[in-house]
Image (spheres, grey):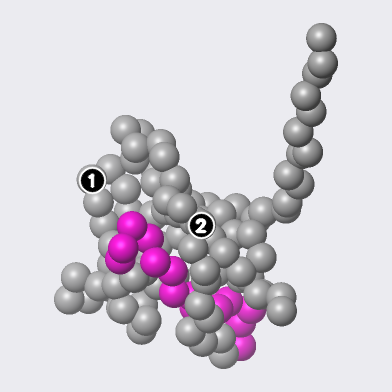
Amino acid sequence: MNQQTYPIKMYSSKMFKNIPMFKRADLSRYNDGEWKAMFEDEFDVEVINDKARVYSNNPFAHKPSRFCKLKLIREEKDSNMRVFQLIVNGQKVFFKIAHIIRK
């Protein structure tokens, strides 16, 4: 009996917990600018190099979004935080995390 082996895909990802998501790049909470859904106000973001996906904190939805390319919008002054854009389920979302995209 032959045993078939598969290579193990090794990658290192970073998980950012409880990140608020916004509809506009200015990260304004006013005029319906923040993404909110039932049972969730903040989301978890998994980042691998220059791609990311979003996990829902909703207890009924456990499936994460697919990996999409991160786009750097701007760097915050006097901080290590950066504002990124990501396409999640066909919608543009903006969020702020401490991550550097390596080229």
Q: Which is nearer the eye, 49 or 45?
A: 49
The answer to whether residue 18 shows anywhere in this view is no
Please identify the residue farthest to the left as the structure is shown.
Answer: 31
- In the rendered view, tell whether residue 72 sits above or below residue 16: below
**Mark 2 to mark 1 CA distance (whole Å):** 23 Å
How many numbered discs? 2
- Give the number of the mark in front: 2 or 1: 2
- In the rendered view, tell whether residue 22 sits above or below residue 53: below
Residue at 25% x, 51% y is: 37
Residue at 64% x, 78% y is: 80
Residue at 73% x, 44% y is: 9
Please identify the residue farthest to the front as the structure is shown.
Answer: 1
Report which residue position mark 2 lands on: 67
- Say what secondary structure mark 2 lies in: loop
Q: Position of residue 103 (x, y in %)?
A: 71, 79
Q: Which residues are magenta?
A: 78-91
Q: Position of residue 68 (x, y in %)?
A: 49, 63
Report which residue position mark 1 lands on: 38
